[in-house]
Image (cartoon, rainbow, N blue to C red):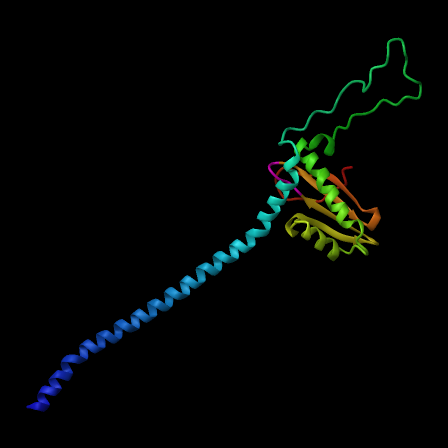
Amino acid sequence: MRRTSASAGTATRSPHLMLATAALAALALTACGTEQTSAGRPHSSAAGVAGARPATAFTEMLGKVAQQCPPSAAPEAPPSGPAETLPAGEAPPSDAIEPIAPTAGPEVELNARDWCAGNLHEQRIAEALWNLAEPTPTKVRAILNDLGYIDERIHDLRQSGTTTRFFLDLRDQGGRLCLDGSAAGEQTVVDKCVAPVTGPFTPGERNA
């Protein structure tokens, strides 16, 4: 009889043990899946934040450089008519050349903010490249990066002899500013150029 009772007790407990074991296994699997999911989400989010940091810093740099410039406004039309009025009765010299107002290029296509900011960008880049010995594309890119210009905005970086040419896409707030640079030591030149308002940036001819 005792054996029968013990067997019965064992038989009674077995279903409960099996259910508890199954529950623990399911809980462990759920916890494992939750851990993987939780670990995966922050990693993906962190990667996105890290990728956005350079672009954010670049935009902040553009704003800082242009903070002393006037707000964006439509480009002013080039002046028309004589540049200077001669006194009554005085004729212009026979070899006088009448100035021709520009009809294209940065002078007429960039707004006041872009023109002002372009001057500031020209100065800071030229000063940084002025004393660069052997301006290779790698060295020029490193200096531009140090100044805050990101790789996505550096175009057509190439070397020709002892000179390294590059273009910078500085379009911001609907502007059209770009820079055309030639790093060549004391012969370094950085000029403003004009880019399309929207769309991909395509390096073009220098607009002096």
Q: Is residue 173 magenta?
A: yes
Residue at 10%, 91% in the rendered image: 3
Position of 186 relative to 107 (above/below): below
Work out whether residue 145 or residue 165 is closer to the camera in this orientation and state it: 145
| Observer able to see residue 204 | no
Work out whether residue 60 or residue 167 is closer to the camera in this orientation and state it: 60
Magenta highlight range:
170-174
Q: Residue furthest front?
A: 68
Using residue 94 as the reference point, say whether residue 21 is left or right of it. Answer: left
Displayed quadrant of residue 204: top right
Residue at 82%, 50% in the rendered image: 185
The location of residue 32, given as percent across then percent down, is 37, 69
Residue at 69%, 33% in the rendered image: 110
Q: Quadrant of the C terminus?
A: top right
Work out whether residue 142 or residue 18 is closer to the camera in this orientation and state it: 142
Residue at 41%, 63% in the rendered image: 37
Displayed quadrant of residue 91: top right
Which secondary structure dominates the residues rendered in magenta? loop
Position of 32 relative to 84 (above/below): below
The location of residue 104, given as percent across then percent down, is 74, 31
